[in-house]
Amino acid sequence: MANIHAKIDCIGLFCPMPIVKIREAIKALAVGEVIEMLADDPASEADMKSWTKRTGHELLETSRNAAVYRFLVRKTR
């Protein structure tokens, strides 16, 4: 299990706000650190896969509990 260095709650926010929020939050992390994001936007899973692929950050984990998605992303650069 990865150590989580930051958490952001994007529940109630819809595209593109979860991506905007994680893009801002990840700037404060050092390379190798992990951020957790919670979101309930049904599009967030596809958005996160696309964003991590585009930015090169590593999507470590995607899970879902009822309507809430949980993403763990490692900063790579």
Image (cartoon, rainbow, N blue to C red):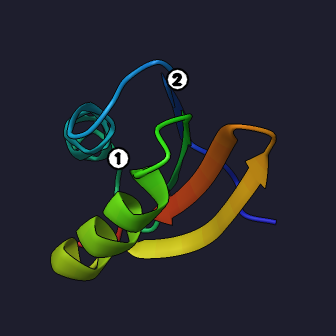
Q: Which mark is residue 11?
A: 2
Give above or below for 53 relative to 3.
below
Q: Residue at x 49, y 72 (%)?
A: 59
**In-image side of 33 versus 52 (left or right):** right
Q: Residue at x 19, y 38 (%)?
A: 20
Q: Quadrant of the C terminus?
A: bottom left
Q: Residues within 10 Å of mark 1 (few under 14, many from 20)?
A: some
Residue 9 screen position, x and y as percent:
52, 24
Q: Residue furthest top?
A: 12
- Mark 1 falls on what kind of element? loop
Q: Which mark is residue 73?
A: none
Residue 21 screen position, x and y as percent:
27, 33
Give above or below for 20 relative to 43.
above
Query: Circle 1 sits on which residue?
Result: 29
Q: Is residue 71 visible?
A: yes
The residue mark sitting in front, 2 or 1, is 2
The amino acid pointed to by label 2 is Ile
Count of marks overlaid on the render? 2
Q: Residues within 10 Å of mark 2 (few under 14, many from 20)?
A: some
